[in-house]
Amino acid sequence: MKKIILTLVGMALIASYALAEELEYFNVYRPTEGMSADEIMRIKYFNKYTLFAHDVAYTGKAYFIDKSGSIRERGTARKRINLGRKSDGIAYKDLTVFTGPTQVKGLCSLSWTYLNPKRDQDIWVWLPSLKRIRKVSQAASDDSFLGGDFTVEDISTRRFEDETYKLVKEENFPGYTSDFKKETYYKDTPCYVIEATPKRANWYYVKRLIWIDKNYGTNIYDEKYDVKGQKFMTLFRWHEIYNVNGKEYPIQIYLEGKDLRSGHTTEIINETVKIDQGISEEELTESALSRSRW
């Protein structure tokens, strides 16, 4: 299904110590010198899905900009509960929703992700116009998320186990200038550059180049390449540091995705963030989707 939902994702940080193969939930991690590409990417995914926190909630806006400059705006909200629960194998539950305009208000997507990497996510979508819930296959991970330039995989389904990794180099990031905000971000930030190759055959990209901030282990910039070796998409992510009980958490605030073939751009801007507010699991169940009011 081509139009699920969105908001941004949070990210977490890190305290430095020797890495176990599996990182423990509700802790903080930073990359350290000498780590392998796999170790760096484990931290990156731990941060992407905000596994440092018990729960995270966001509200924000999404903007879809075509080549002519025409803009469509959507209100968004997101809630995530991190569980890491071995009794039923649930890693985390994630709800995203459009809060406006009227024609899409209430469109919801709920996903449950499991500790076992071989188990697909359970994904449900509430379609308010049809007053029905539809189960979505994880096989649709290459579909457009919200009808924009991010895929479902970019936002919510890609996991560490989906790719193989190689550390290409270490360098200072040259900086990224946003077309939308007209600001430059991360100039001269020390980074690891990692090449990620998908394990799926005939996937929609053959490799990604990923810039990881050495300070916080966050993924700040991606380039995707096709079978001809041509770059066809870029994804930028800006993070702000939140101090929570004396710990520093880098939270993803702003995303900009560009399709270099169509000239289309998607912007996601997170306007509010709440961490560890005690979100109830009852809010993230299949039956709760149809009862939600936004």
Image (tube, helix red, strand yellow):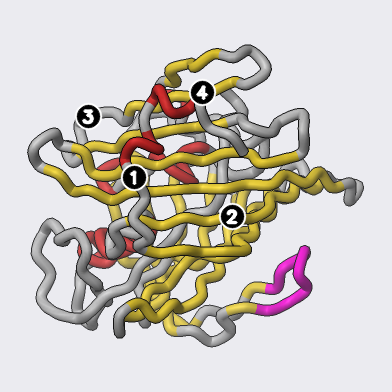
* Mark toward the viewer: 4 or 2: 4
Which disc number belongs to residue 119?
Answer: 3
CA gap, disc 1 and disc 4: 16 Å
Along the viewing direction, whichever of 227 and 256 lies nearer the viewer: 256
Picture residue at 53% right of the left edge, 23% below the top: 126
The three-letter amino acid code for the residue at tag 3 is: Arg
What predominant SS class does the magenta segment belong to?
loop
Mark 1 lies on a secondary structure that is loop
Cα distance in 3D space between marks 3 and 1: 24 Å
User: Who comes first in sequence, dot 1 or dot 2?
Assistant: 2
On-image quarter of the C terminus: top right
Q: In the rendered structure, which amino acid carries the disc numbered 1?
A: Ser
Dot 1, how many residues are within 10 Å of its Cα: few (below 14), some (14-19), or many (20+)? few
At x 72%, y 77%, the residue is 183
Q: CA distance from mark 1 to mark 2?
A: 17 Å
Q: Give the mark nearer the N terminus: 4 vs 2.
A: 2
Query: Mark 1 sits on what residue?
Result: 280
Which mark is in front, 1 or 2?
1
Q: Nearer the viewer, residue 91 or 101?
A: 101
Q: Mark 3 or mark 1, which has the lower sequence index?
A: 3
What residue type is disc 4 on?
Ser
Q: Which residues are magenta?
A: 177-184
Q: CA distance from mark 4 to mark 2?
A: 20 Å
Q: Can you tell which quarter of the image residue 87 is in?
A: top left
**Which residue is labeled 4 in the image?**
290
